Amino acid sequence: MLKRFAKYYKPHKVLFSLDMLASLMVSLITVVYPMITRTMLNSIIPNRRYKMIVIFGLVLLSLYIIRMLLNYFIQYKGHIMGVHIQAQMRSDLFNHLQKLPFSFFDNNETGKIMSRLTDDLFDISELAHHGPENLIITTISIIVSFVYLSTINIWLSLIIFVCVPLLIATSLIARKRMNSAYREGRRAVAEINGALQSSISGIRVTKAFTNSEKESEKFEAGNTLFKEARRDAYKAMGEYHALTTFITDVFNVVVLIAGGLFMYAGRINFADYSAFIVSINLFIGPINSLIRFMEQYQSGVTGFERFLEILDTEPEKDDAGAKDVERLEGNIEFRNVSYGYDDDPDVLKHVNLRINKGETFALVGPSGGGKTTICHLIPKFYDIRSGEILIDGMRIQDIAMSSLRKNIGIVQQDNFLFNASVKDNILYGRLDATDEEVIEAAKRANIHDFIMTLDEGYDTVIGERGVKLSGGQKQRLCIARVFLKNPPILILDEATSALDTATEMMIQQALDELCKGRTTIVVAHRLSTIRNADRIAVISGGEIIEEGNHEELMQARSMYAKLYSQQFRDMPLVV
């Protein structure tokens, strides 16, 4: 883990070296004051060399000015280095998230992922800056101060030094408890962020159903978990600080008693004993700093471990030998395909189907039957467990995912729109499209006239998830996006099921235009929308139980006919 952490310093080697050099100089300058104190007590003051008192004072003041500038550099440039490291880690994490499979996002809440991108990385950046700096300052200060104290009285110094192993042992024991407590605290923060993200995203639903109290209860449950986790963390931290502070206080007691006995025995004079008393803080101070640093270290390391958990998650990757393809024709075939999610191993069972180029193929059946799963398997959002899916005779595993997905357009019931302009949202279909192509796509989706009524036209920002648009307007914008993409394969996953009848008819016109010349897979609950499909497959329990066109399935009077008659029971059965 240390090696992986250290690689983030490489782009900042010069700044890191200067920061460490500044830290080293600060450590050395700190030792000057007790050295001057001892010299003045032993020599300058007894010999009445008053001019040297002023000179030594001016030298000390000059060194303190230098230390002030060095501290400014450490705090400013050191933090800048930490920010750069944090930004690089955030970029690495974000880019890795883009490569993770759908299953990862199925199992991890957005708020919890956000917590790792923000809170965890902030603590990591603080450790990245202060960690090496504190270690250098404290280590050098401890060594130099011990050497200096030894020049005053070696035996008194050794007596003090024997207390150090006791301090280290106590720190290691207490650190284990802190580690566990901080890990739980991280999880609690992620829970709160997850609850916040969910509640804020669903605020309109909450208000519509007047369920603010319920959301408050859910939030308070996470908040209570956070309080308990932080309580345990602070309890462990309190025990750690109390014990280690007590041991450092023992240092002063030892110095007082041992030094007094040494003076009584004539093994140290008053000036050296006074200098030793003043200088002992050179030794104890860095140790206290090291103790305080442990809290920051624990927080940063815990955050880095959580950072690595995501970074080590296996990304989506092309199979060996997968190749880029140009425009596909759109012949799709499922051969004995089976698939299951973690909690439902039998979503699809030995599915066989063929969809010809340019054909409109509809999938119908009860909810949970596997219709949407089939749609997700074609662009390889999930890996099949057995069988084969072929497009134009090629296994989808043999096609690079980027080029496979470029050939597939998807319009869903709840399409995502970004908090950006109308133009940017349409451009998502093909980022290099011209303004003329964007407008043409909007016209074909029957949304251009509406866009022109907006105050800023195509530059109008539509709000988070397109909140400023109606359902029909959002769908037409997403259809325009697919027009711009111009894929040979089109998947319509209940694209109009959330719309009212009048809006659905208007959207259907745009969809009919979109389907022309493309292989189209339609998932629909409203069977009236797929009556004209070339073929219809009825899926139930993960299996295809019927297949044919509308007339053939109605004459068979099986499940499709039953579903159709249920939707149109007030009308005569039409065949």
Image: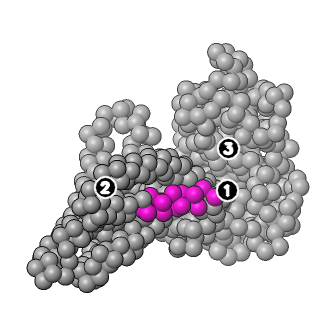
Residue 224 appears left or right of 326: left
x, y (%) of residue 192? Answer: 35, 51
Q: Give the label on residue 411, or none.
A: 3
Question: Is residue 208 visible from the viewing direction of this image?
Answer: yes
Identified by mark 1, the residue type is Cys
Q: Which residue is mark 2?
A: 49
Q: Which residue is mark 1?
A: 375
Q: Is residue 434 magenta?
A: no
- Name which of mark 1 and mark 3 comes first in the sequence: 1
- Name which of mark 2 and mark 1 comes first in the sequence: 2
Labelled pair 1, 3 in contact (Cβ < 8 Å): no
Q: Is residue 24 magenta?
A: yes
Q: CA distance from mark 1 to mark 3?
A: 11 Å
x, y (%) of residue 313? Answer: 57, 68
In the image, what residue occupies the spot 67% across and 65% down?
316
Q: Which residues are magenta?
A: 14-28
How would you rate the neighbour count of disc 1 (Cα within 10 Å): few for under 14, some for 14-19, many for 20 or more?
many
Q: Could you say whether the residue bearing mark 1 is in a helix, strand or loop?
A: helix
